[in-house]
Image (cartoon, grey):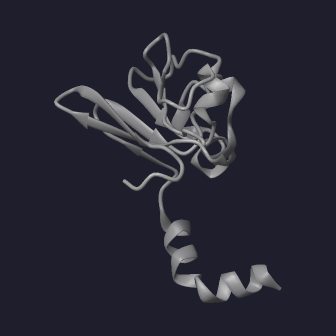
């Protein structure tokens, strides 16, 4: 019942979210919810499921199908480097921004300015 109420009350939000692309690509970056499948030669042809749900295979393997940095969420940075702060992969091919806000941890923000990465965060309970 609650699910149907949400679908009706927030239909315009759900329609908007459903209309968004699975990734956004610039000259230097790929922005994606969960990641790209490193086992697929042409990452743009991967299953839509991987863009939204992939975890381990993505962040534990180098991204060789592109020379762009992949910026992603979905996997808490606590699971990547035992810290709420933004995670920069040792290879420089991935940046994880999910600070675990949904679980009472950081709300992270990555600012890209002049080729530099500037990190910001708000701790749970703080006002921005």
- Residue name at image x 68 percent, y 82 percent: 6
Closest to the observer, 95 or 100:
100
Closest to the observer, 125 or 43:
125
Q: Residue furthest front?
A: 126
Residue 11 position, x and y percent, is 58, 83
Q: Is residue 100 left or right of residue 118?
A: right
Closest to the observer, 114 or 125:
125
Q: Is residue 20 left or right of residue 49?
A: left
Can you say whether 100 is above or below 79 in the image? below
- Residue name at image x 67 percent, y 82 percent: 7
Q: Residue furthest right?
A: 1
Q: Residue furthest top?
A: 90
Q: Which quadrant, please, contains the N terminus?
A: bottom right
Can you say whether 7 is above or below 72 in the image? below
Residue 91 position, x and y percent, is 47, 11
Can you say whether 18 is above or below 13 in the image? above
Picture quadrant of residue 30: top left
- Residue name at image x 28 percent, y 33 percent: 27
Q: Is residue 103 left or right of residue 96?
A: right
Residue 8 position, x and y percent, is 65, 88
Residue 5 position, x and y percent, is 72, 87
Q: How many marks?
A: 0
């Amino acid at each position: 019942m609650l699910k149907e109420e949400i679908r009706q009350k927030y239909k315009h939000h759900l329609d908007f979210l459903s209309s968004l692309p699975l990734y956004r690509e610039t000259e230097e970056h790929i922005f994606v919810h969960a990641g790209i499948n490193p086992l697929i030669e042409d990452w743009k042809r991967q299953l839509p499921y991987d863009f939204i749900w992939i975890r381990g295979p993505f962040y534990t393997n180098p991204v060789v199908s592109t020379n762009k940095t992949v910026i992603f969420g979905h996997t808490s940075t606590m699971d990547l480097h035992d810290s709420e702060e933004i995670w920069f992969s040792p290879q420089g091919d991935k940046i994880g921004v999910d600070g675990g806000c949904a679980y009472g941890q950081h709300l992270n923000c990555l600012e890209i300015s002049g080729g530099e990465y500037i990190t910001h965060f708000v701790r749970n309970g703080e006002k921005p």
